[in-house]
Image (tube, rainbow, N blue to C red):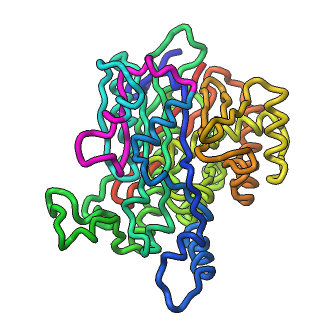
């Protein structure tokens, strides 16, 4: 197939995977640390739900760091780690200030000494920033693993409701391989939007611990994540994400016309957005045309904001659920999801779950991507992430899946499977978007 746009880079995205940490913290757990003489813990828990849309978030164990979650995500996946030639870790909560967390992941996986490994730290946009590096590396014929891993809760002030109510831990990643002409599919990426508003970069920051203000006995208590101007930050994130989507949608349309002689509306594709805050996502959806808004999934009530890990974790879970929905070919009540999943595992060999010593591993495949989700600490399906999905989110997801399924059934061009949009915004001061397409 001839591609006109010189900015498009081809690769093979073969594996996606994530780790959901073992400890579950609900809103009441968070509320009990908040000092408020006017409200009870129960009232504070309800306020958290109203302001964030989050019911629960995941925390790593006290002895775990970002590298440990990354190792669990990769080690429990179906990926052959000997195939990794470059390892990029995206994180804002690395094991140490130096060296790079990637080296500890490298050691934990016992990778070849010739593997190039490094970190990318760029707030919530770190994963897509790492992707931008990875695409260039893969283009030089080196297979690359990108893993975003966060143990953010350790850097929070537990009495600050604005931060502790929002953030959770987690790890998610993908594996990009150099093009194999014998494969039936190819992935392509185009980075289509970048915005840096550095004058507001201190709106969400850790004020001490760097060379600007090293830690000492007097400022040690300030070595925690702080929100400045939360209302301004909230509105800026909405504005930046909305503009990124609209700008990227125009570039998507231009790409389709130039390369495929098609229009935006008929081509399947989701818009995966960094799961910052459910109210932010709903505001963005309300500001967009229906044709665009109906492609945006939300799945964060049970995980919270995983910072830069939120987007790859979101994508892994959404594609897993979409694969299930395509198998069901009907809407399933949330209460029946576990039983229907068990039935699918019995009837179809592409679905499986494995009870491990410390958790449950969920595996499937969507199109040409292998998907592995390790739910650390869960002892059964009834205790797993499948049971924790917020019912409202599940119902909305099924509508999105059904819309795309109908669109796919009406779409006759087989060489282009879909074009998704990935968008992330770090505190409103760093917003990046890229197109991801799959062709056969």
Q: Quadrant of residue 155?
A: bottom left
Q: Quadrant of residue 270?
A: top right
Would you say residue 271 is visible in this rendering? Answer: no
| Quadrant in which the C terminus is drawn | top right
In the rendered image, the residue lying farthest to the top is 182
- As displayed, is residue 138 above or below residue 34? above
Q: Is 100 or 316 nearer to us in this picture?
A: 100
Q: Quadrant of residue 375?
A: top right
Query: What residue is rendered at 66% in x and 49% in y?
Result: 385
Q: What percent of the width, then of the height, locates residue 274? A: 50, 51
Q: What percent of the width, then of the height, locates residue 363? A: 66, 31
Q: What percent of the width, then of the height, locates residue 245? A: 50, 50
132 lies left or right of 278: left
100 lies left or right of 331: left
Query: What residue is rendered at 56% in x and 87% in y?
Result: 39
- As displayed, is residue 293 above or below residue 418? below
Judge whether residue 93 is colored magenta.
yes
Q: Is 439 or 264 nearer to us in this picture?
A: 439
Stretch in magenta = 78-104
Query: What residue is rendered at 40% in x and 59% in y?
Result: 154
């Amino acid at each position: 197939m001839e591609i006109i746009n010189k900015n498009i880079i081809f690769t093979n995205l073969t594996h996606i995977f994530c780790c959901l940490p073992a400890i579950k913290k609900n809103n009441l757990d968070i509320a009990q640390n908040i000092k408020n003489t006017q409200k009870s813990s129960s009232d504070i828990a309800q306020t958290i739900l109203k302001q964030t849309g989050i019911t629960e978030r995941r925390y790593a164990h006290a002895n775990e760091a970002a590298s440990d979650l990354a190792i669990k995500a990769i080690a429990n996946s179906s990926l052959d780690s000997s195939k990794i030639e470059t390892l990029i870790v995206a994180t804002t909560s690395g094991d140490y200030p130096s060296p790079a967390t990637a080296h500890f992941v490298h050691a934990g996986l016992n990778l070849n000494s010739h593997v190039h490994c490094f970190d990318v730290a760029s707030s919530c946009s770190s994963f897509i920033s790492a992707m931008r590096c990875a695409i260039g590396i893969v283009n030089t014929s080196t297979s690359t693993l990108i893993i975003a891993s966060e143990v953010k809760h350790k850097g929070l002030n537990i009495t600050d409701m604005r931060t502790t109510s929002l953030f959770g831990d987690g790890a998610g990643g993908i594996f990009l391989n150099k093009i194999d002409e014998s494969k039936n599919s190819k992935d392509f990426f185009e980075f289509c939007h970048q915005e840096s508003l550095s004058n507001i970069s201190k709106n969400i920051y850790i004020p001490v611990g760097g060379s600007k203000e090293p830690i000492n006995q007097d400022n040690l208590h300030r070595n925690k994540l702080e929100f400045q101007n939360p209302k301004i930050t909230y509105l800026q994130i909405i504005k930046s994400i909305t503009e990124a989507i609209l700008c990227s949608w125009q570039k998507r349309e231009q790409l389709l016309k130039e390369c495929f002689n098609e229009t935006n509306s008929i081509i399947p594709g989701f818009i995966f957005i960094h799961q910052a805050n459910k109210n932010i996502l709903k505001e963005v959806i309300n500001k967009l045309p229906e044709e665009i808004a109906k492609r945006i999934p939300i799945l964060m009530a049970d995980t919270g904001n995983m910072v830069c890990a939120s987007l790859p974790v979101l994508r892994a879970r959404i594609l897993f659920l979409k694969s299930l929905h395509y198998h069901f070919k009907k809407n399933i009540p949330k209460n029946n999801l576990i039983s229907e999943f068990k039935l699918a595992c019995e009837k179809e060999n592409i679905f499986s779950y494995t009870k491990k010593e410390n958790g449950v591993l969920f595996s499937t495949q969507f199109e040409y991507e292998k998907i592995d989700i390790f739910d650390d600490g869960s002892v059964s399906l009834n205790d797993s992430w499948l049971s924790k999905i917020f019912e409202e989110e599940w119902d909305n997801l099924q509508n999105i899946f059904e819309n795309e399924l109908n669109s796919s059934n009406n779409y006759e061009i087989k060489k282009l499977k879909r074009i998704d949009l990935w968008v992330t915004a770090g505190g409103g001061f760093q917003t990046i978007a890229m197109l991801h397409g799959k062709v056969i």
